[in-house]
Amino acid sequence: MTSVPVFLYHAIADDPPSWIAPFTVAPRVFVDQLDRLAGSGCTVIPLGTLIDAMRNGASLPSRAAVLTFDDGFADFHRTVFPELAARDLPATLYITTGAVRTPGRVTGESLLPPADMLTWRQVGELDDAGVEIGGHSRTHPQLDTLPEHMLHEEIEGCRRTLEDVLGHTVGTYAYPHGYSDRRVRRRVREAGWISSCAVANAFSSPDDDPLRIARLTVRADTATDVFQHWVDGRGARTAPFRERPQTTVWRLYRRTRARLGSPVGGP
C-alpha cells in the first residue's frame, strides 16, 4: 500500500499564544522541513490529486506528500505562503470562518481563544494566489458531540460563507480537533463537500476514506528524525484501519461531558 504523509500544521510562529504553542512550529524549523521534503525526493501534490487517486484510481508519484494548515492563523499570509511560493508548493488552508478577523472585531466569533488570525481580504488574496481554501467549521466545536440542529451552521453555513466571500465553490472540509462520526460525515457529504480531513496521526493512502483523510500532526516538539521518518514513509500506521476501541470510548466520554455542560477542551 502506498503511504502518503498528509502533514497537518497550525501556526508557524516564534512567539504564539500559549494555548496554541504546543501545535506551533517555529519558522526556521518549518523551512527546514520544507527543505527536507525537497531533499528527500518527495513530490508535494495538491490534496485534490490524492482525492482523485482515492475516488478514481489516478496514479500518484512514487513518493508523494500533502501540506495542510488548519484554523487560519495570520502567519500563513506573512510567513508560510512566501516559503511555499518560493518553492512552488501547493497547500490547502482550512478556515474557521467565525475566527476570521473583521473590522471592529479582532478575535472573531469562535471557540478558539484570542490569536492573530487572517482577515477576509487576506483569505481572498491567498485564494487568488492558488492556495486551496477549505472549510474548518464556523466556531471550531467538537462536531461529534453536537446535537443535530447545531451541525447545520458548522458544516453547511461554513461552506456558504466561504463561497460568498470567494465567489466560487469550495470542496474540502476538515473536522475541528479531527473528530467526526458517521452522522457528521453524512452531513458533510450531504452539504456537498467532496472530501474531509481528520487527524488519526497516520499516513493516508489511495485506499483511504475521502471523507476521513488521515493526517500527521506536526507539533512544536516533533523531532527532526520523526519528521524525516514520516517523509520516508515510516513511523506511523497507514489508513484505512478500524477505529481503535479507546477512540470510541473517548468519544462517548466527550459526548457525556458536553451533555453535562462541561465539554472537554483543546486547541
Image (cartoon, helix red, strand yellow):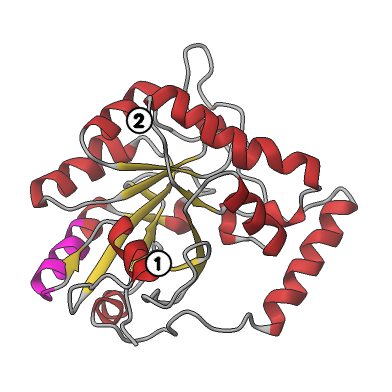
Residue at disc 2, secondary structure: helix
Question: Within 10 Å of the Cα at label 2, are there few (<14), some (14-19), or many (20+) other Cα atoms?
Answer: many
Instruction: Please give the label number shown on residue 123.
Output: 2
Q: Residue at x 29, y 74 (%)?
A: 227
The x, y position of residue 45, in whole percent, is 22, 61
Question: Within 10 Å of the Cα at label 1, are there few (<14), some (14-19), or many (20+) other Cα atoms?
Answer: some
Disc 1 residue type (three-letter) = Arg
Prevailing secondary structure of the magenta residues: helix
Q: Quadrant of the N terminus?
A: bottom left
State the residue in front, 69 or 30: 69
The x, y position of residue 161, in whole percent, is 52, 28
Is 107 placed above or below 141 here?
Answer: above
Q: Residue furthest right?
A: 260
Q: Residue furthest front?
A: 56
State the residue in front, 183 or 12: 183
Disc 2 residue type (three-letter) = Val
Q: On the image, numbered disc 1 is attached to which residue?
A: 55
Q: Residue at x 36, y 75 (%)?
A: 206
Q: CA distance from mark 2 to mark 1?
A: 28 Å
Q: Residue at x 26, y 68 (%)?
A: 65
Going by the image, does 93 lie left or right of 34?
right
* Labels 2 and 1: the sequence-earlier one: 1
Residue stretch rendered in magenta on the structure: 31-41
The x, y position of residue 185, in whole percent, is 62, 58
Going by the image, does 34 lie left or right of 235?
left
Residue at disc 1, secondary structure: helix
Q: Is residue 32 magenta?
A: yes
Q: Is residue 135 magenta?
A: no
Residue 267: tell me if it is visible: no
